[in-house]
Amino acid sequence: MRPSPAHLVREFHLAFGLDARTAPTEVSPELAAHRGELLAEEAAEVAEVAVEGPLDRLAHELADVVYVAYGTALVHGIDLDEVIAEIHRSNMTKLGPDGRVARRADGKVLKGDHYRAPDVSGVLREQGWTG
């Protein structure tokens, strides 16, 4: 079994002397801005190759976005796997009890009457956040 992205990114941060917090923490505005810039750079690279390809470059750029997102979570001390699990739980409530899915014209899945919003604050509190 391969290590999780969170484990791999933590290994990278520790090896290169980058921030790696273990509990949810606010960081300096400068560090937060830097992480935002890194994410924006990676997202722009995905957008650049998403339509034209090639597929191997798209896969690379998508992985870079995930890697930087996990790094940003680590800098803030957020267990992103747990947050993703909560978002998934919430997203699954978009499915109606009859199995029907409401979609926008472009195919995006919409929230139905049974939708339950994610409790990300609760997840962070379980991780030690006091905000």
Image (spheres, helix red, strand yellow):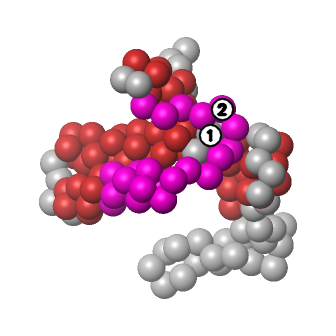
Question: At numbered mark 1, what does the secondary structure look like: helix, strand or loop?
Answer: loop
Q: Is residue 116 left or right of residue 27?
A: right
Residue at figure coordinates x 26%, y 61% from the top left: 44
Q: Position of residue 34 (x, y in %)?
A: 37, 53
Image quadrant for the C terminus? bottom right
The magenta-colored residue range is 18-40
- Residue 74 included in the magenta stretch of the image: no
Among the 4 quarters of the image, the one containing residue 45: bottom left
Check disc 1 and give the amino acid type: Gly
Give the camera-side residue of 65 and 24: 24
Asked if 77 appears above or below 43 in the picture, the reply is above
Q: Is residue 1 left or right of residue 102?
A: left
- Residue 21 included in the magenta stretch of the image: yes
CB under 8 Å between discs 2 and 1: yes
Q: Position of residue 17 (x, y in %)?
A: 41, 25
Residue at figure coordinates x 72%, y 68% from the top left: 94
Q: Position of residue 48 (x, y in %)?
A: 19, 61
Crowding at label 2, few (<14), some or many (≥20) Cα neighbours within 10 Å?
Answer: some
Residue designated by label 2? 22
Q: Is residue 8 visible?
A: no
Residue at figure coordinates x 48%, y 45% from the top left: 72
Check disc 2 and give the amino acid type: Thr
Distance in Å between CA atoms under marks 2 and 1:
5 Å
Outermost residue to the top: 1
Question: At numbered mark 2, what does the secondary structure look like: helix, strand or loop?
Answer: loop
- Which numbered disc flags the more N-terminal residue, 2 or 1? 2
Q: Is residue 127 left or right of residue 17?
A: right
Give the camera-side residue of 103 and 53: 53
The label on residue 77 is 1
Image quadrant for the N terminus? top right
Give the camera-side residue of 20 and 55: 20
Q: Position of residue 63 (x, y in %)?
A: 36, 40
